[in-house]
Structures are given as structure tokens and as C-alpha cells.
Amino acid sequence: MARAATKTLIIGSRGSQLALWQANYIANKLAELDVSSRIEIIKTTGDHLQTASLMQAGGKGLFTKEIEEALLTGSIDLAVHSLKDLPTQTPAGLTIAAIPAREDPRDALAGSRLCDLRQGARVGTSSGRRGAQLRAIRPDLRIEAIRGNVDTRLRKLRQGQYDAIMLAAAGLKRLGLEDEIAELLDPERVCPAAGQGALAVETRSNDATAEICRRLNHEESSVSVTCERAALAALGGGCQLPVGAFACPAGGGLSVMAAVVAKDGSRCLRAQLTGSWDSPEDLGRAVAEELLAQGARSILAEHS
């Protein structure tokens, strides 16, 4: 049963430094609405997998399943996620109540700019999408798996285990680590993950907490990521697929670009469309259909 809106809301979050930054950010936004809250840390399947790659582990819902279960049972009132970690299908009884203003959606390199990396340099990433797009640009690079939180990855870089590592710019900026960024990669070169840089505030459907949290929604960010997630869903829905999607306002409408890349980087399909601001899901599905018409299905089959 949902708690009364006057009570302190319980925010479910993973325990990493970045996840707690995100949860505290939402707690502060709620405080501005005179809503008190506290954070409860929940360990997820993904947090237990410190050595296996996310692709090998299956990807979908690894960082969200246990938190969503706590939400459904009523032990927490809302959850704060990195939107790119959320599967495109929301469980019955739950809703994404708000997408706050998005941080930088781009991918970033730490340690070196791409053009300065020597032949055969080692680049660490946990993302099949990032690795595939890097191979398409620089097939000579050695793309190697890296796990751990942001600080752990940066420590491995400094220890010389990698010549560069690839992360989301948003996480580095939120943690005050912007100086670690050697290069921001333009979406035309490396297409971001759907929803990258955005937070999702998830609640139970149609209860008082959902109504409160909807006041945190940022329309431009919400419309953009709705388009991106529609494209991802039409292409298979997995957050670990080598699929990028990025939408942004264009004039009075919405522009979206999307990419599907083979594991080895040998095939890179891209599409870009502009459509109505009021129909982001239709536009997302349309750009996915364009990629499927180019032959994306055969690439995606490699990852099924």
C-alpha cells in the first residue's frame, strides 16, 4: 500500500558513488517541493558481477531488477536509475514518473584523445555499443572489458592497465571529474546509448508519489529520451545491444540519429530523421525501421 504523501519518502538506489549522487540529487529536488525523503541502498545483480562482462551476463535489468521488486512490494516509494540501464519495457504496476533535466549525453575518453592513441592501444569499456563503434573508427585498437565503478576504472587507467577508457561523460561530470575527460565524442562519431545522461524517477503507477515526482519532469529531456527508447525497443530493446540512439530538438521538431554496429566494427549502419515534437515514439520507430531496411537485423542477430 502506498504511503501518504506527507510521510518521508524512501528512495531506492544502488550503492555506488554515482548512484548515490543521483539519488541525493532527486532528494534535493524533492526538498525544494517541501517533500522529505531518505535513501535506502539496494544491491543489484549487476553489483555482484565484478568480473563478468555485462554482455556475457545478459545485460537486461542487471542494475534495476531488485530495486523494481522493492518498489512493487512497497518497501520503497520511488527509485532513481540511470535511464540507459532501464529495460524499455516497464514492469506492470510501475511507471517512469519523471525524467529530470538531462546531463551531457555524449561518450567520453579518459587517458587519451582518440587520434593520439598508438596502434594497438588498449581501450577499456564495459559496453558492446562503445566497443563496436570504436572498432569501426579504429580497427587497430584492442578493446578490452573493464568493470567497477568510475573511481575503480580511473584507478586501473592510472595503473597502466589501459591506455584509455571510455565512459559516459555524464557520470564524470556529476562526480566532479570533468578534468579526467581527454575527449568528448560527438554523437555523429559515436552514437550514445538511448537515454544516456538522463535519470529516471520510477514509482508505482497512479499513487501519490507518482503525482509528486511528475513535478520533477523536464519536457525537452523526456521527449528526447522517449524517442530514443522507442528506437531501441523497435530494434530489440536490450541495453547491451550495439545500438545507439540520440534525439534532440531541431527547429520546431525533433531530430533523431541511430546506429547499429557489428561486434567487430566491420559494419556500421546509421540513419537520421526529423519529425514531429508531439510524436517522439513514432519518430523513434521510424528511424529503427530505416536501420532494419539497411540490414540491421543480421547484425542484431549476432547478439541474440
Image (cartoon, rainbow, N blue to C red):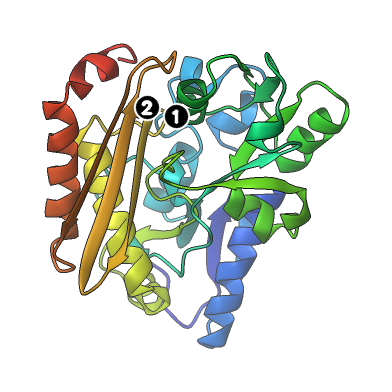
Is there a contact, CB below 8 Å, between mark 1 and mark 2?
yes
Percent coordinates x, y for residue 254 in the rendering: 23, 63
Q: Determine the residue positioned at 59% across, 71% down.
A: 27
The first of marks 1 and 2 along the sequence is 1
Q: Name the residue under label 2.
A: 241
Q: Mark 1 points at which residue?
A: 129
User: Which structural element holds mark 1?
Assistant: helix
Residue 160 versus residue 105 in the image, above or below: above
Residue 290 versus residue 81 in the image, above or below: above
Q: Which amino acid does label 2 sit on?
A: Leu
Q: Which amino acid does label 1 sit on?
A: Arg
Q: Is residue 45 left or right of residue 87?
A: right
- Marker disc for residue 229: none
The count of marks equals 2
Q: Determine the residue positioned at 48% across, 45% down.
A: 67
Residue 137 versus residue 170 in the image, above or below: above
